[in-house]
Image: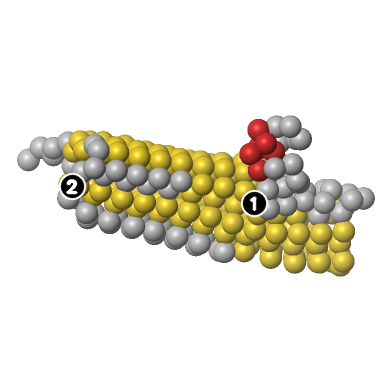
Amino acid sequence: MEKRDLRISGASVATGGEYRDVKVSGASKITSDISCETMSISGAITVDGNVDATSCKISGACKVRGYVRSEEIKISGGSSIGDFLEGNEISLSGGIKVHGDIRSNHLKLSGEITVDGNMECEEFYLSGAITSKGTVNCEKCELKIASSSSLGELVGSEIVVKEGLSSGGLLKSLFGGGNGQLKVTLVEGDDIYLENTTAEVVRGAKVTLGPGCKVKKVEYSEKLEVHQQAKVEEKIEL
């Protein structure tokens, strides 16, 4: 049986189920789990369940009470995800909150992001601010921090943490004129470069601590470089 499309707009209510293409706008509500090939929702939308799709685009003040799982996920605006996000390509922008984990091959975040769970990905790029209580585990990580941010642990092969755009840039205008600062318990990787980072422990093969870093203990096996404007309490060569 061929799957049907779902189109709703305005102050409407629809049940979930299996569909081909889903397009929802306005102040609408989906009352249960939904599975589809493509999903596009915008406005003040609530999904009282999980979303399974091949392609999923969400914008506006949307709330999904369950998980979102899709090959490609794009979320913007002031959206909230009640459980995990899982997809090959995930792009989040705006003021996004994810109450569960994020699992992706390619993860790109911009704006102000809050993640209650862990984050696992091959490549991770951030421009903005992030708050996460869990562990970020990735192969390649590049964070451009434009405001006060915090992570539980940051683990990867290649890790770069820099201040966001220079004074007068877009990120500075959005997040204020102060320096972007990252607070993290542990940073562990093969090749690590950090700026404006406060950490309990930094552990790696090659470690470079740039300006604004405050680290209690650094453990390194190949190379350690410390900028004159960085502070390290203890250095241990492994």
Q: Position of residue 134 (x, y in %)?
A: 56, 63
As measured in the structure, the alpha-carbon distance from the residue carrying label 1 to the one carrying label 2 is 45 Å
- Could you tell me residue 226's position as x and y percent? 87, 52
Is 26 placed left or right of 222 in the picture?
Answer: left
Provide residue 20's location: percent of width, then percent of height. 20, 38
Write down the residue under mark 2.
Answer: 14
Q: Position of residue 236 (x, y in %)?
A: 84, 66
Q: Any mark on residue 157, and which?
A: 1
Q: Which mark is residue 101?
A: none
Q: Nearer the viewer, residue 19 or 65?
A: 65
Which element is circle 2 on?
strand
In this rendering, does residue 206 appear at all? no
Above or below for 166 versus 229:
above
How packed is label 1: few (under 14 Cα within 10 Å), some, or many (20 or more)? some
Element at badge 1?
strand
**In which quadrant is the C terminus drawn?**
bottom right
Q: Amino acid at mark 1?
A: Ser
> In the rendered image, is residue 63 in sight?
yes
Task: From the image, state whether disc 1 or disc 2 is nearer to you.
Answer: 2
Residue extending furthest left? 1
Which residue is depicted at the point 35% across and 44% down? 44
